Amino acid sequence: MADGSSQKEVGGGQLEERIDLSVETGEKIAQAQSLIDTSPSNLPESLALLAALEKRCRVGNDTLSLVRVCETSLQLCKDCSDEESLIATLKSLSTRRSQKTKVVSALVHKTIPWVLQKEGGGYVPVDVDSDDQKDSRERIVIALREITDGKIFLEAERARLSRALAIIKERDGDIAGAADVLQEVHVETYGSLSKREKIEFILEQMRLTLGKKDYVRASIVSNKINRKAISEEGMEEEKIKFFTLMTESHRQDRDAFELAKDYHNIYRTGKVKGDENRWREALRSAVVFLALSPHSMEQQDMLNRIKVDPNLEKSEACKETVELMLKKEIVKYPLPQQVELESLAAFIEGGEDLTIHWKETFRTRIIQHNVRIASHYYRRIYGKRLSQLLGLDPVELEMQISSMVSNGEIYAKIDRPKDIIRFARPQSSEAILSDYAADISTLLHLVETTTHLIHKENMTQ
């Protein structure tokens, strides 16, 4: 058009007028810059000049010029080292009526490098020298988080800013505050972040939540991580970190079997298997906590899988422990390798109270193993005799049997007056008759087969 304006079609079939203000924008920006070059105290006049131009560009729908004006306003504040003006300008420009999403995105992207720097696969706060710079950095990060809140097109930036603010708070010693900052961000719903970045963010959520001793929330957060995703190639560090954090959570719950699975998952990681010291420690820890775990089909399956692991041969104590837990034989307590097992770092980690608990649990598991073996070989036995076999006090033996019966691990009936313990479950008349009929049928089949073989041998001779 002759007046430098143009039109473009928008939703609903209507036309939106666009005025080309690129020439004027260049002139005004140069004018504002010259004011700053003359004296940094001219910053308010420069910002006022650009603010008037910003409105014209916004109303005239000249997005390219609008972005230039907004970015220049921020740059002038940065050049003058005026933090108050920078934050005020940032908030003002991003919250203007009918402000373009491209402008808000450009403002955020323009400011982020001033407070964040890329390190490894993530972003961390830029290094500062003084407390004033530290406060300035934190205020800008908070302002950017407020701007990005609720904006889907800036969800990745919000996640990175939140993580940076959490780092700042953690360095100040505010672990709870850092955890609360990350807790507000539901990064698992963000589509603009890579899988690795999401996992790293959730791992930080877990670490800080555990740091403030909120174990219930840590368990909830851990469920956000897909186990298949961290088992993929290239995710080994994340997998090790995840299961290491899970050991802290399961140690608090005193869940021995989950701890065994955590250490076994760490052991199976390729990066750990390449380091003998690391895999040896992880394997030994897995075996110890398997021995401390309640008897179950899953526990037995895991013991059998570890038993055929070639690396088990390199740890005599673990090999003997696995074999003892799988054998159908009574085990004496303490085990020959007991001292070595109880000296592992994973066993004593968590404080003296937890170590005492694991030692008591170890003894209990050996007793339960022996009672289970006795129930396998005896239909009924005198309580006094069983106490002698297991080396236990009769009262303690009765308590252990009662506990195992309550947990559904074995079947037992105790006749106190006669001091008889029955492990065989009573059968109904129909069940006894069915077993008898099955035995007779098997016997007749064997007799018939034997007779046939005798006749065959006679015919051959």
Image (cartoon, rainbow, N blue to C red):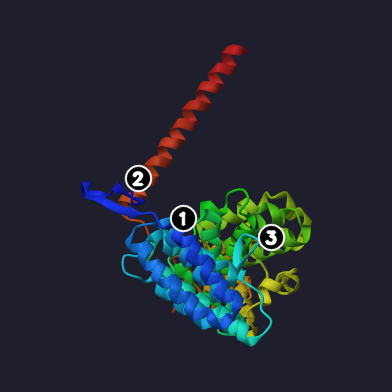
Tell me where residue 359 appears, x and y as whole percent: 64, 77
Element under label 3?
helix
**Residue designated by label 2:** 434
Q: Residue shown at 50%/26% (left/top)? A: 449
Q: Mark 1 points at which residue?
A: 192
Q: Residue 283 carries which label?
A: 3
Which one is closest to the eye, mark 2 or mark 3?
A: 3
Corner quadrant of residue 33: bottom right
In this rendered view, identify the residue nearer to me: 199 or 96: 96
Give the CA separation, mark 2 to mark 3: 47 Å
Q: In this orientation, does residue 202 appear?
A: no
Amino acid type indicated by mark 1 = Ser
| Amino acid type at mark 3 | Leu
**Residue 128: horizontal and vertical position, in percent?**
66, 78
Q: In which quarter of the image is the C terminus?
A: top right
Closest to the camera, between mark 1 and mark 2, is 1
Residue 201: image location, x then y, percent: 53, 65
Kind of element beneath mark 1: loop
Nearer the N terminus, badge 1 or badge 2?
1
From where the camera sits, is residue 459 visible?
A: yes
Q: Which tag, 2 or 3, sits closer to the chain's start? A: 3
Q: What residue type is labelled 2?
A: Ser
| Rendered residue at 71%/73% (across/down) | 345
Please state which of residues 412 and 323 is positioned toward the viewer in this rendering.
Answer: 323
| Neighbourhood count class around disc 3 (C-alpha, 10 Å): few under 14, some 14–19, many 20 upward | many
Q: Distance between the residues labelled 1 and 2?
A: 66 Å
Q: Which residue shows up at 56% across the image and 55% down it?
A: 230
Q: How many labels does the image show?
A: 3
Q: Residue furthest top?
A: 460
Q: Which residue is drawn at 50% across and 61% down?
A: 26
Q: What element carries label 2?
A: helix
C-alpha span from label 3 to label 1: 38 Å
